Amino acid sequence: MNQNRFIENIRHIIVRDLKEMVKEIDELDGQYLWVRMNGIINPAGVLAMHSCGNLKFFIGTCLGNTGYIRNREKEFSISKISKEKVIKEINETITVVDQILLNFPSEKLQDEMPDPPTQHKGRTIEFFLIQLCCHLSRHRGQLNYISRIVQQNTFVL
């Protein structure tokens, strides 16, 4: 696969999934954004904020030198911010990902990923971009699951 095509595909998948996340958050009744349901560890708002923090750090800071400083612990402890602020955060993340990957030089894909988590030390940027897609997809699926439970009123708090 052409490396420029690879970056474009990764960009397309991440931006697409973040836009879908905006739709799901927007459709979710705000009272359920921060509710921890029985058997589900993270509420919808946490999944969205964690996904944004992850992408803004690894794509924004590590690949694009945006200077975004991540506070991973805060991503999991945030609660009670408005749905509008969560959507704004997702839209800002879309802009960051879109701009950086649109201009990312394909010759760097085989470079080692800067500042990865310990379990990914030594992996390439190419590998890590795939990992980021998988991570976002996982959390988007969890968010979709929460949305469907809420819509069907089949939940236990």
Image (cartoon, rainbow, N blue to C red):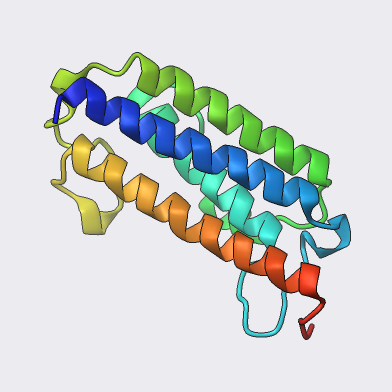
For the N terminus, the image quarter is: top left
131 left or right of 142 in image: left
Taking the image as drawn, is residue 141 in sight?
yes
Seen from the viewer's position, the closer of residues 106 and 149 is 149
Quarter of the view holding residue 14? top left
Q: Position of residue 5 (x, y in %)?
A: 24, 25
- Residue 56 visible in the displayed image: no
Tell me what residue is drawn at x 14 percent, y 19 percent.
Answer: 107
Residue at figure coordinates x 36%, y 53% from the top left: 134
Tell whether 55 sits left or right of 107.
right
Q: Position of residue 72 (x, y in %)?
A: 52, 52
Between 129 and 120, the one nearer to me in the picture: 129
Q: Quadrant of the C terminus?
A: bottom right
Looking at the image, which residue is at 23% across and 59% down?
Answer: 119
Compared with 2, 149 (above or below) is: below
Question: Quadrant of the rendered structure where residue 43 is?
Answer: bottom right
- Front-most of 85 and 3? 3
Residue 13, placed above or below residue 45: above
Q: How many marks?
A: 0
Q: Is residue 28 above or below residue 98?
A: below
User: Residue 151, percent across and down?
Assistant: 79, 67
